[in-house]
Image (cartoon, grey):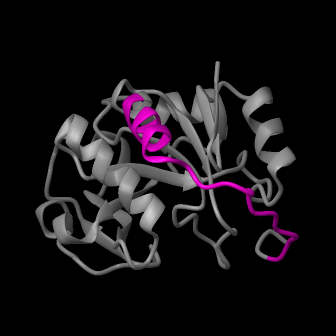
Amino acid sequence: FPYCQDDEAPTTKPSKETIDKVAELLAKGKIVGWYQGHGEIGPRALGNRSILMRPDIPNGKDILNQKVKHREWWRPFGASVKQDKASEYFDLDNSPHMLYTAKVLNSDLHSITHVDGTCRHQTVTPEQNSLFYDLLDSFESKTGLPVLLNTSLNLGGKPIAGKIEEAIELFNTSEMDALCVGNDLYIK
């Protein structure tokens, strides 16, 4: 607990249309759950069991904590970025497992920048996670940003959702705006 649990993958993958709808919701500042493929092994959400949000919302960290995560105010959120654009936003351009902190180079990324000016980010390639990369790419086409706030698909202190019903329960019991499970998109 919480890193060893049963895992259930969706039976479908999101279509380009669904990915674009999710990117549009994120562009509008919505909080979106992203449940794809099999869950990650380890302590970080790396694009299969994630809660995602725009990284440039000035009080986004507080909004996410109030509506979904309910964590301590001082705990930072991580980010995911297309690897080919990482050096424009962070002083570390290869961090596929969100293990290292890096200096944030763009002062507009309020929701992911910790008080010391750093962020623990994940770099994403199409080979590593093509669906998540496609989402980042679609979000970039709508906003100019190849970066998303990325935190684990759970409430603070609880295990990451490993079954579809757990993800849906989290969606129904929090103020998350949308949830994408495979190609199924739930919107409040």
Specify whether residue 111 is in view: yes
Residue under the point 60% across and 30% down: 178
| 11 sits left or right of 147 in the view | right
Q: Identify the image quadrant of residue 155.
A: top right
Q: From this view, report whether residue 126 is shown above or below residue 176.
A: below
Residue under the point 58% across and 69% down: 44
| 183 sits left or right of 130 in the view | right
Q: Is residue 49 magenta?
A: no
Residue under the point 26% across and 71% down: 83
Q: Identify the image quadrant of residue 117.
A: bottom left
| 168 sits left or right of 45 in the view | right
Q: From this view, report whether residue 172 is shown above or below residue 148.
A: above
Residue under the point 49% across and 44% down: 52
Q: Position of residue 173 (x, y in %)?
A: 80, 28
Q: Quadrant of the N terminus?
A: bottom right
Q: From this view, report whether residue 72 is shown above or below residue 29.
A: below
Q: Position of residue 34 (x, y in %)?
A: 59, 48
Q: Is residue 17 magenta?
A: yes
Q: Position of residue 172 (x, y in %)?
A: 78, 28
Q: Quadrant of the C terminus?
A: top right
Q: Which residues are magenta?
A: 4-24
Q: How many marks?
A: 0
| 15 sits left or right of 109 in the view | right
Return the residue nearer the eye: 114 or 134.
Answer: 134
Specify whether residue 113 is in view: no
Q: Position of residue 69 (x, y in %)?
A: 64, 40
Return the residue nearer the eye: 3 or 9.
Answer: 9
Q: From this view, report whether residue 128 is shown above or below residue 164.
A: below
